[in-house]
Image: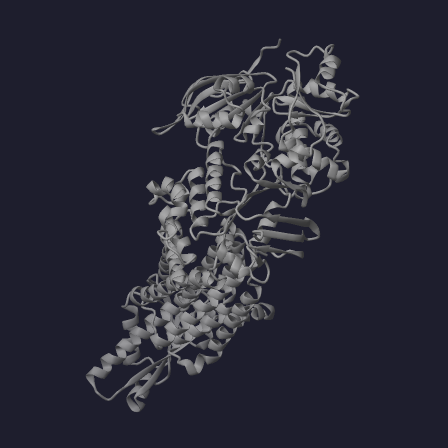
Amino acid sequence: MKNAIEIYDINKSYRNKPALKNINLHVEPGEIFGLIGPDGAGKTTLIRILTTLLLADSGTATVNGCDIVKDYKHIRTSVGYMPGRFSLYQDLTVEENMNLFAKIFGTTIAENYSLVADIYSQIEPFKNRQAGQLSGGMKQKLALSCALIHKPDILFLDEPTTGVDPVSRKELWDMLKKLKKEGITVFVSTAYMDEATLCDRVALIQDGVLLSVDSVDGIINSFRKKLISVKSDDIYRLIGDLRKLDFVEKAYPFGDCVHTILLDSEADENMILDALKNHNHINLSAKQVIPTIEDCFIDLMENHNG
Amino acid sequence: MERFLAFVKKEFIHIMRDKRSLIILFGIPIAQILIFGFAITNEIKDAKIGILDFSKDATTEKIVNKLLSSGYYQLYSYLKDDGQIEQVFREGKVKQVVVFQEKFEINLKQTGKASIQIISDASDPNTGNTLINYTSAIINDYNSEINRNNLSGLRIIPELRMRYNPELKGVYLFIPGLIVIILMLVSAMMTSISITKEKELGSMEILLVSPLKPIIVIIAKVIPYSLLSFVNAVSILLLGKFVFEVPVHGSYFLLLGEVILFITTALSFGIFISTKTSSQQVALMISLVGLMLPTILLSGFIFPVENMPIPLQVIANIMPARWFLIIIRDIMLKGSDITFIWKETLVLFGFTALFIGLSIKNFKVRLT
Amino acid sequence: MDEKWIVEVEGMTKKFGDFTAVDSISFRVKKGEIFGFLGANGAGKTTAIKILCGLSRPTSGKVTVDGLNVYTQAEKIKEKIGYMSQKFSLYDDLNIEENIRLFGGIYGLSNKEIKEKSEILINKLGLQDVRKELLKSLPLGWKQKLAFSVAIIHDPSIVFLDEPTGGVDPITRRQFWEMIYEASSKGVTIFVTTHYMDEAEYCSRISMMVDGRIAAMGKPSELKKELGVRNMDEFFVKLARSK
């Protein structure tokens, strides 16, 4: 089966500032593909190029088999798009928004109701309320319903979870999983590293460069160094102390602990505990942990920056 | 087509739910008319006048009595000769001088015609104009009186002279001028803001990534505002006619046609602005500073274009509003038909074509 | 140990008409502590912070910040606090030096102090080469670090951070947290509001607001254990849903 999205050597600059450099990747049909990276990495630019809103400076891409430049009209009828900023009409009611988007796509709410039923049924009780008066999570459900009303083959979501509280975030990801079951390909961007685990495959992006494209497990497996999580009551002093150890490559804060990457594979957590025992740390503890996607990202970023 | 209608409906909902804009759209025109209107028609009482009577006969005396008993005028003094006219005006002693020619009564009876010269101080054009109107009215009144008594068809011809601002331009123009400004405001500003609002909100992105053709979006946006503009223009005309008795001497049909033409010009200008900007704030600034102020100051609404220095005249000439003002003034006040204003109409057509052309050239099916 | 309370809140309530935004909450924040203040949108976080910054008066309750009473000494409180938010922190169209000078001036430093502090700050952040560059030309991560440094330029007793590292790349983010740890080790109290739950994990103590009340408070590790969840995200979802 052909790929849902194929991207070849896409480059894009704004006023000589490169935003995307040689992007190559493909997205398989029916998968949830995550574009993971910090603000300003080029996520929105790539999504806008794929949704035919922007032209790349060079390179080609196909979405649903259609060329993003030549067949842009085709693409516009077959994809759903939810931009980062909330983009529905605040002064229209829930129902008016839904009807408008249904009409724009030449369909009706009833026709594709089954697809949006799950999401829309949660906001239907408020269908006569203006969108501006909905809570953040509800607004998002409405936006998603509108993006799905024409049963798109591929759904693009640009940072759908930014500024959204964890409850609504979780609900959103649950909805995306349901869409996947309906056979819809989901291309989603996010700055939350931890959301990578919810995707089938991810692309890590930084400064317009893809650091890695793989499944989360694949990325974590390719992290070959030993990672020790060290804890004590005085994190700030602990970081300093760890960095002074000659078998430590680097140490950085990670939540309530310090993630420490060891230089040589012989070293282990006991060596750390040993080395720090005279530093008066209270509640000192250390254990080897499996790296998270964020650890991998840091590592890949540093490799890339040289 | 259904898509299009759905979109037009949405635009109407936007306008109707935004109470504040609605008040601005309909409230401001009415407020402006009332302010301008009453500022211009404020009553004049006991204005000082001078009389220069070279004839001094029974008829001139009757007319003078009629003037002085009207309540509008108070006699400053009888003047002795022409030279005194300039003097009393200069010293600000009088607002108006009425001059009766020699052998007034004799002329009237022998030739059936006699003339009165009415000279007004128009350094305050509103007052000058009003006084002239009052005097003319009183003389016309007297005319019909004497004609009722004998059917010989005698005519007294008032000869009007304005001092210091001979053409009195800008005074009668407030209704036409307001129509120009309101149409610019509603059509150009509101359209450009409404389009840039979609860009700012991000909904333009969604609309672009949809089968909806961008040109449809624009046309759908333009329709409600053209309707509103038209309603506004008509209500200003009605208010002008029934509250302030501003005449419409020409054809209503032609007038409304030209109004529609100008609305199109303004809308295309609004669209053009919106293709060049992406924030509501910038669109607002361009519309206000780049459009409204020059329209008010340079179109001839307040200051006659003929009196401007050449560079400003040049700028005034590239303002669509200036040409529309000529058209609407000619139709309303002079009763001109299309044969007199076809050139100006053509200029407006030219502007419209230019703005639409530029908009299409700048219009993007993608973001920037 | 120096057990000085920088924030003391007892029975703080704020009502808007019939609506109770903050419902009799009580908590204390220690000097040098990194206190995470969590809650969903509309849970009352913003209202509570406005009160602590002296921008709004509580309807009732006892509230002091660095020993100052919010009812009577709101203006003094403003001199003792720093503030940084992700949405607005520094002026994009001023250069780095101008921004530092401006905020130093706003916080009431003398010209001499401003000069000294800007040198230290610019050197520390490694901004020597770009000191005359407009802020908007800087990468987001640098801006955030500079913004934090500026927020504590007047040595406040407490600094309020609103989602300080959302969307920042992981390396810059670490550098940012190290700066926070450093400030905290020097005795500056850090008050973080966020709904990025992984940000919450960095705090020494957190409180979670649900519907105007504090639903849970304690060390992240203890709270996770208590509720039997793996991470703060699950913690948040569990608490916010339990209402």
Q: How far across and down, in percent of the image, does residue B38 sit?
A: 35, 60
With A100 as the anchor, is A67 left or right in this view? right
Q: Is residue B121 at all visible to an observer of this figure?
A: yes
Tell me where residue C185 sits by quadrant: top right
Residue at 58% of width from left, 36% of height from top? A196
Residue B52, image x, y percentages: 38, 75
Q: Quadrant of the N terminus of chain C?
A: top right
Question: A151 or B234: which is nearer to us?
Answer: A151
The residue lying furthest to the left in this view is B149
Q: Residue at horizontal 36%, vertical 48%?
A: A95
* Residue at (45, 38) in percent of width and height: A136
Q: Residue furthest front?
A: A1
Q: Is residue C190 rendered to the left or right of residue B113?
A: right
Residue B308, located in which quarter of the rendered image?
A: bottom right
**Residue that protrudes farthest toward the top in the picture:** C1
Q: Which picture quadrant has residue C14? A: top left
The answer to whether one can see residue C54 in this image is no
Above or below, C40 against B7 in this view is above
A190 displayed left or right of A8: left
> Which of these two is toward me, B184 or A239?
A239
Comparing C122 with A151, the one in front is A151
* Snapshot colouring: one colour
Instruction: Relative to A48, say whether C18 is above or below.
Output: above
Name the spot of residue B212 as percent of width and height, x first.
46, 60
